[in-house]
Every structure is written in C-alpha cells, then in structure tokens.
Image: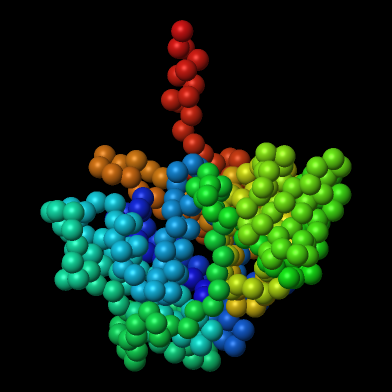
Amino acid sequence: MIIMRVKADNILCFNDFEINMSYPKKIVNSPVENEWLSERTNFRYKKVNILMGGNATGKTSLGRILMMFMNYFKDGAVARFIDMISDFSRSAHLEIDFVTMNLRLYRFTFKANMKNDDGYDNSDITIEIKSVRINKMDSYETCAAKLDDGIKCEHTTYDKVNTEGWSFIFPRDITVNTPYSLIGKNSKYLTVLEKVLKTLDPAIRKVEELKDVDNSYVIRLDNRDVIMQDGKIANEAILSSGTKAGIDIAYIIASSICNLHDFYYCDEIFSFVNSDLEKACLSIIIEKLGDDRQLFFTTHNTDVLDMDLPKHSYTFMKKEVRDVGVDISCVYASDYLKKAEDSLKNAVENDLFCIAPELNELYDLIDLN
C-alpha cells in the first residue's frame, strides 16, 4: 500500500489538515530510485518521507491515523475511527487516497455527524471506499480528479481491497508493553541484528538464535547473556536504551532487505542513537527500499538534512495557535528550495519555514527567584 494523500478534520490533533505525497516531475539522477509505480511511470509518489517539526506537531498522531486506517482492512471495525474523534460536538472527516498493487487508486472516506451525547450508531457514521483504474499515462492528479468527479468509479468494501504488509514502530514510551518485532528462522535477519547491536554496543560479542526455543535469541556480552524470546527481553536493564532501540532498527533494515512489507512508519526510533548511526541506518533502509514501497521517517535530528535526498523528501509539520483552536499544517521544502545547490540545513537553521519553537516561556524562568 502506498499513501498518496491524507485529509483529516476533527481527528486527533488535526483540523482541516492535509498532507500530499505526490510530486510534480521526475528528477534526473535522483538518489532515490524509481519514485513512481513500477508499471505506471507517470504516477509519481514520494517513496521517502522525512517528517520533521517541533514537539507536538502531529508526527506521531499521523502515524496513529495511518496505522488505524490500515488495520481497518483486517476486520472492518469502525470503532477505531470513532475513538480518534476529538470533539463530538462537531462533525469529523477522514479521507485517505492510496494505491495497491492492482494498479488502482482508492479513496477511503470516513464521516461522522456531530453528537450531543457520547453515543454513535450506524446512522451517524458513513464509510465509503471507491477506486479508479490507473491507466498507462495517468498521474496521481489525473486519477484523483476522476475520484473527485465520480467518473468511472468502482465502489467496494474493506474486505475486497487487496492490501500488502506494513510496519509501524513508535517510541517505546508509547508502546511500553509491546514486544519487539523479530524475524524468526531468517539468516539475513540474524546477520542484521548482530551487526546493528554490535555497532551500538561494542561490548556485544555475538548474537545467536536459540536452537531449542522458537523465536528466541541470545545477546552475548563479555560477562552476561541477554535472552530475547517472542520479542520480550528477559533482563533488559543490562542493555542501554540505544542498544534496545537497535532491535527495532534491525527489524526495519532486515524487513526492507527481505521485502517483507511495502509500507514503513518509523517514529523517532533513533532518539537514543548517535546522529551518525542514525544517518547510516536510514541510508541503508532507503537503499534497500524496493519498488512500489514507501517509508515515513520522523526525526528531530537536523543532520539528516545533509543527506543526499531530493528536496521533496522533506516535509515540516508546524503548529499555530489561533484565537480559537490550533492548526497543524505541512510545509514542503521543495516549495521553497528550487535549486539543487540550495542548502536545506541552512534554510532550517535560519528558520525559513517558521518551524522553530517559541522559547520565551522557557527564558522567563531565568527571572524566577
């Protein structure tokens, strides 16, 4: 599944929000290969999406929305969307354009009427899924226009949409009781896991798969062994926060190498990891990201702005407080920086996109006696 556009109103922290994952024209000698559908080269999409911005600007919330949306195709449960409505006293709307491997552009629409009480019934909720065929010369924009006009659209239900796999990894303070994702009986995964963990902690001598216990590994240090079974670490206090983050990092790298998923959302999984290591791991993930795949990657590390990526790979999310309510919007680097030699890092450091945090409240503390 490839996400092309998300529109959300009164969903979590978003009001009248939109993010678009198409881009206008192909880049000659782009460092990111094949940013288009493999059988429809005019249908361009952002294969790599680096999301940046201040705290509480919706990066994690966007991931939660996409995760709930994709999980909907497993069981068709509507309650997950109702739980995301922020204000029951007004209507809510979620619209997501996405592509599957059958060369169709789908539009999923969820609408909920406003309520004066806490309960919803079927008459209050509308879910629609419609699609159009992506023809040989079509772009996203031409297909989206067909969906807008309702021309030659096919309507379907969640169980008729053929989706592939996806992977979401969020910070551990959000998923504190969630087991780490492992890949059992896979020699490539074992190699990746060992190399990542040994890079993060040179005291680790070896990582081995336990032969007699399914889905279990042992991390061998100089004087201790650490056991992982079914994604649970038996004595995790021995490992540093960065080393434990390496388990998630290894899963993403190995998954991209083995083509296990077609969609990845990595939310600040490098918070405890050295900047150079983050850039190195991200470059490997991007290098191994296959055709018709997509990566969302959130970070606060401005060093990634120096990576050899197209300008359109970077989206900055910003929050503005209005007289009534709060708005979250997207700033696309490619809208401002048109030349290859334009420095994205310099633009951010000079706050060209107006995304720097307001620090006056903090500096007021200096006068506090």
Whether residue 53 appears in this view of the structure is: no
User: Height in image: 59 above or below 349?
Assistant: below
Closer-to-camera residue (367/238): 238
Display colour scheme: rainbow
Residue at the extreme front? 212
Q: Tally the numbered discs.
A: 0
The structure residue drawn at horizontal position 18% and vertical position 54%, both measured from the top left corner, is: 118
Closer-to-camera residue (111/222): 222
Judged left or right of residue 270, residue 219 is right
User: Residue 209: x and y, percent?
Assistant: 77, 62
User: Height in image: 243 above or below 283?
Assistant: above
Residue at the extreme left? 116
The structure residue drawn at horizontal position 46% and vertical position 12%, both measured from the top left corner, is: 367
User: Height in image: 240 above or below 298?
Assistant: above
The structure residue drawn at horizontal position 49% and vertical position 91%, both measured from the top left corner, is: 135
Judged left or right of residue 82, residue 63 is right
Judged left or right of residue 224, residue 98 is left
Judged left or right of residue 106, residue 270 is right
Whether residue 220 appears in this view of the structure is: yes
User: Height in image: 252 above or below 299?
Assistant: below
The structure residue drawn at horizontal position 45% and vertical position 43%, both measured from the top left corner, is: 56
User: Residue 237: x and y, percent?
Assistant: 67, 39
User: Residue 203: x and y, percent?
Assistant: 84, 43
